[in-house]
Amino acid sequence: MSNSSSISHFLLLALADTQQLQLLHFCLLLGISLAALLGNGLIISAVACGQHLHTPMFFFLLNLALSHLGSVCTTVPKAMHNSLWNTITISYKGCAAQLFFFLFFISAEYFLLPIMCYDRYVSICKPLHYGTLLGSRACAHMAAAAWASAFLTALMHTANTFSLPLCHGNALGQFFCEIPQILKLTCFHSILRELVSIVFSISFAFGCFVFIVYSYVQIFRAVLRIPSEQGRHKAFSTCLPHLAVVSLFMSTVMIAYLKPPSISSPSLDVAVSVLYLVVPPALNPLIYSLRNQELKTAVWKLMTGCFQEH
């Protein structure tokens, strides 16, 4: 039996057993992380600098890119440090901070996705009211609500999780701090409070998911009523990137947290965690850039301008 007050650090799961594989994982994480940082950094810079991109859709895309940058910078650097120096420890306060920021940025991403869906819904289903429903003040309020909700969600879960007494040591079965692994270490009789918070968050998340599905049903019905093929193609081209991002995020998270316990293993858990932590932030900029000519042009001008200056 151990108490949380006597624990000064946690033991994280090693990405590999040998030093050679540790270095390989370090290189893989470094490559994917650099791709995520570069892609999202270019989107943020292009939207911030391009006056013609100061629209609701690109404003929310900028916020989404910020959440991607935050989620990558929260968990991956520590995993890379441990792989490079062959260590597995993280301090108690460091674990709490990592969990808070991980939940903050992941929650912000999830709350931004329904808002971006609402933007596409109004644009296609209620185009005459677009300027009224999605003015600059309304967009700012919605983005602020998403970030504030993410902050409160992260604060609630972090405070609840780290207020529970630990009775089963300090070894986490994951390469970063996450709630399910910490709950495995807690005393069973004290877990109810955090479980109530988790059920509340899952219910709210399910509500967001239902909203996204309902909105896209209405969007597709409206698009199919457009008489011209060119008009339908243009409408679909503005929705498909967001739909792809939503599908990628939802599918990887569901695989991570809803897979049957019978197929769970440390190596599989690590692989799935990398899948939803690092892969979506790395792929999302590519998805949006390939399908949006305005963004592609702005990013290209930004890159060529930087090269010309140097």
Image (cartoon, helix red, strand yellow):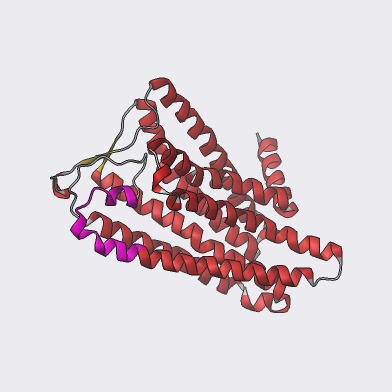
Furthest residue in direction front, as rendered: 262
Image quadrant assignment for residue 115:
bottom right
Residue 166 in picture, x, y percent from top left: 19, 49
Please identify the quadrant where the C terminus is shown.
top right
Which residue occupies 66% across, 39% down? Answer: 306
Residue 188 in picture, x, y percent from top left: 21, 55
Q: Is residue 210 above or below residue 162?
A: below
Q: Is residue 305 left or right of residue 80?
A: right
Residue 264 in picture, x, y percent from top left: 40, 42
Whether residue 274 is visible, yes or no, is yes
Q: Is residue 67 left or right of residue 246?
A: left
Is residue 18 rendered magenta in the image?
no
Q: Is residue 126 above or below residue 149?
A: below
Please identify the quadrant where the N terminus is shown.
top left
Instruction: Give 9 or 244, whichever is nearer the viewer.
Output: 244
Q: Is residue 170 above or below residue 230?
A: above
Is residue 187 rendered magenta in the image?
yes
Whether residue 152 is visible, yes or no, is no
Which residue occupies 43% across, 49% down? Answer: 260
Q: Is residue 2 left or right of residue 34?
A: left
Q: Which residues are magenta?
A: 179-198
Furthest residue in direction right, as rendered: 228
Instruction: Give 146 or 46, whichever is nearer the viewer.
Output: 146
Residue 120 in picture, x, y percent from top left: 66, 67
Instruction: Give 68 or 113, whichever is nearer the viewer.
Output: 113
